[in-house]
Image (cartoon, rainbow, N blue to C red):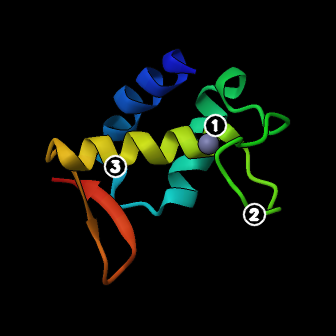
Amino acid sequence: MLISYQIFYNAIPKILKNGPMSHREIAKQLQQLYPKHCNDSIPCPHRKDNSVHPEWDHIARNAEQALKSKDIIIRDPSIRKWEIA
Ligand SMILES: [Zn+2]
């Protein structure tokens, strides 16, 4: 899981060089680039509700938040997309 996080952390800024993207669009790119690290059959154990949510998507969201805290990417709330800071 830590390896997936580092891969996503490094990949997201490169993906966003193509332009602003929503989390869903970033996730789709990550799944195409790193299918082994995007296994939909592993559910997120952190969610208390019953929604089915894969853990890799949670890891990708954590990577987005970490990149935001380092001022590497920013989220434009008006278009609800991430972009390079
Ligand atoms: Zn989780």
Whether residues under marks 2 and 3 lie with C-beta atoms below 8 angstroms apart, the answer is no
The residues tagged by marks 2 and 3 sit, at their Cα atoms, a distance apart of 22 Å
Mark 1 lies on residue: 56
The x and y percentages for residue 34 are 62, 25
Q: Residues within 10 Å of mark 3 (few under 14, many from 20)?
A: some
Q: Which mark is residue 65?
A: 3
Counting residues from the N terminus, which is met first, the one under dot 2 or under dot 1? 2
Q: Quadrant of residue 82?
A: bottom left
Q: Which mark is residue 3?
A: none
Which of discs 2 and 3 lies nearer the camera? The answer is 2
> As drawn, which residue projects farthest toward the top?
3
Whether residues under marks 2 and 1 lie with C-beta atoms below 8 angstroms apart, the answer is no
Counting residues from the N terminus, which is met first, the one under dot 3 or under dot 1? 1
Tag 3: amino acid: Gln
Q: Toward the viewer: 28 or 48?
A: 48
The x and y percentages for residue 84 are 22, 51
Q: Toward the viewer: 78 or 20?
A: 78
Mark 2 lies on residue: 49
